[in-house]
Image (cartoon, rainbow, N blue to C red):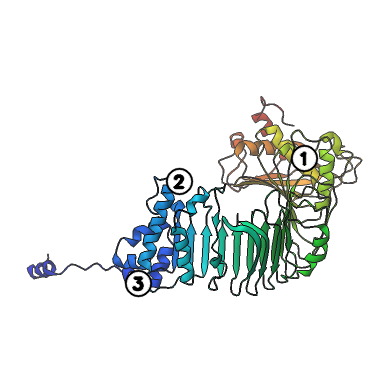
Amino acid sequence: MMTRNRQRRLMNRKPIQEVDLISELPDPIIQHIMSSLPYKDAARMSILSKRFASAWTSSPTIIFDETLNMGSCLELTGKQRLNSFLSYVGEFLSRRRRLDVSLEKFRFCFCLNNSSDQQSNGGIENAISYAIENNVKELELDVVGKRFKLMAHYSLPMKVLSAHSIIVLSLKGFMLEPPQNLALDFPSIKELRLEKCKGMQKLSVSSQSLKIVVLEFCQGLEKVEIDAPNLESFSFGGGANSSCSVDVTACMSLEYLSLKNAEITDEWIKHEIPKFIRLEVFKVGRCRLLRNFHVSNANLKTLELSDCSNLQKIEIYSRSLNTFVYGGQLMPSRVFIYSPSFHAKVSLSVDDPLPHDWFSSLRDFLSCFDHCKELEIACSIEMALIFPIDSRDSLLPPLYDLKYLKVVGKFPAKSEDLVDLVDGLLWFSHCLTVLSFVSGNKEKSLKFEYDIAVAIDEDLQCCYSMPIKCWRHSLKKVTVENFDDRENTILQRFFSQKAIRLEAISREDNGSADALAEEGVSQDYGSVITGNIEDLEAAIMANFLDDSEIY
């Protein structure tokens, strides 16, 4: 038992004093913590103590974003909402002006509903002036916000373009009045982003320090000239009717180049792209002038071509190429890719109903990718990949050497469509090692093993006259991954009926027990169905006596 003296000592002991360890941290660490939080959480944190409030006000990073309902503008709309937001910005900056603190980053995002909003309130100009006067290094000005459609532009103060302290400049939704040719010489800027700006007829940029340039949907822009020998990344995206020409030939350090809706020609690509000896990624989209696309660059690793509607021929020479991406209409089979090993991703635009020559054109087009390491096909209509059975006997498969095939799109819902799709894809490439189906964030796959050394003199007559025998003659083992129970049962029945030398079917997934377990066939996680394939077929048929045929 506890003695009386010990009881008295415990009763007289002073309670342990609580210590706020976060408040004892240096200001830069507190500011870093607050800058990592969402705005609303950081704002709540700032009212917990004077120390937090001081760190919030003196932070080197300032973010004003109307879309986050700053300034109690949640219930307001139009001009009242903008005025409430700008009033909050003005009050915050007036408190900060009394502090002698540096400014690293300034983000100012607001939405104009009409051009008169900028004339009736000087809060926008004052906020921008504050950032420049305090030698901001990273400046982001955004008039568009989260809206897809731009309601009104804001006249750009020219002092933004002449500020020497800026290293990163991002402008979205600004305009020059009147429209003019703009020549910029940046002594220290490293990153320039202009999006949905207008009033620039010709843009010329010269800089020794510039590393990244992004130009997107700049209305009225007719010509772009970039003279930046240390530029590493350039992206241009014009509007649907853009006729803007682009000249980046002085940027010999380019590693990334993306051109969409740009007025570039076959000759420009053929003669200028080889000069960029550091170029690793080249993306071209919706460039209407391109017909014979010829690229030769030994360092190129990724090449993307999308929606170039007049394209007739593609030639790529790159020993380093590992990814080729094509998107658009099915084009003539004039695709030549000279690279020892690459992955191809093809996204085809399909009309419904299919054109009368669709399958012959598809066969010729896919044959251009026979030597690639892996082929990924995206198609909005899965039936467009099922080559008619009556036409297969007269044509050779287009992908004889392909081992890995991935199909991206809506997965067939009907049993007969599933087996038709699998059978059609196996005709494309009869020696596939892996066949995958991707729909959304789900991927299902079939893995195959073959015995190609077996005699076929007495085999099926399905491809008797063909020099290349189909998969049915040599398929030895199938592994089914991530298919549900119904699909798994359908596929097992299909392969057991069609593959004459099938020895085993296995299932590897986290699904529930297979429906065949009721028939005495073991199907636990990772287990393998082995033994007599005739017994397996008998079990399947017994389970589906009243079911319609699937093939």
Give the Cα separation between the discs numbered 3 and 1. 65 Å
Mark number for residue 25?
A: 3
Q: Residue at point 49% right, 54% down?
A: 118
Secondary structure at badge 1 equals helix
Which numbered tag is attached to residue 78? Answer: 2
x 55%, y 53%: residue: 153
Mark 2 or 3: in front is 2
Q: Which residue is mark 1?
A: 424
**Disc 1 residue type (three-letter):** Gly
Residue type beneath disc 3: Leu
Q: If you read the primary sequence from the N terminus, does the residue marked by circle 3 or circle 1 appear first?
A: 3
Judging depth in this view, the residue of 171 and 365 nearest the camera is 171
**Quadrant containing the N terminus in the rendered view:** bottom left
In front: 543, or 521?
543
Question: Does the rendering let one see residue 69?
Answer: no
State the SS at label 3: loop
Badge 1 density bin: few <14, some 14–19, many ≥20, Cα 10 Å: some
Q: Earlier in the sequence, mark 2 or mark 3?
A: 3
In whole angstroms, how far apart are the C-alphas of marks 2 and 3? 42 Å
Q: CA distance from mark 1 to mark 2?
A: 57 Å
Is 406 drawn above or below residue 30 in the view shown? above
Counting from the top left corner in percent of width and height, residue 324 is at 74, 56
Number of numbered discs overlaid on the protein picture: 3
Asked if labels 2 and 1 touch by Cβ distance under 8 angstroms, the answer is no
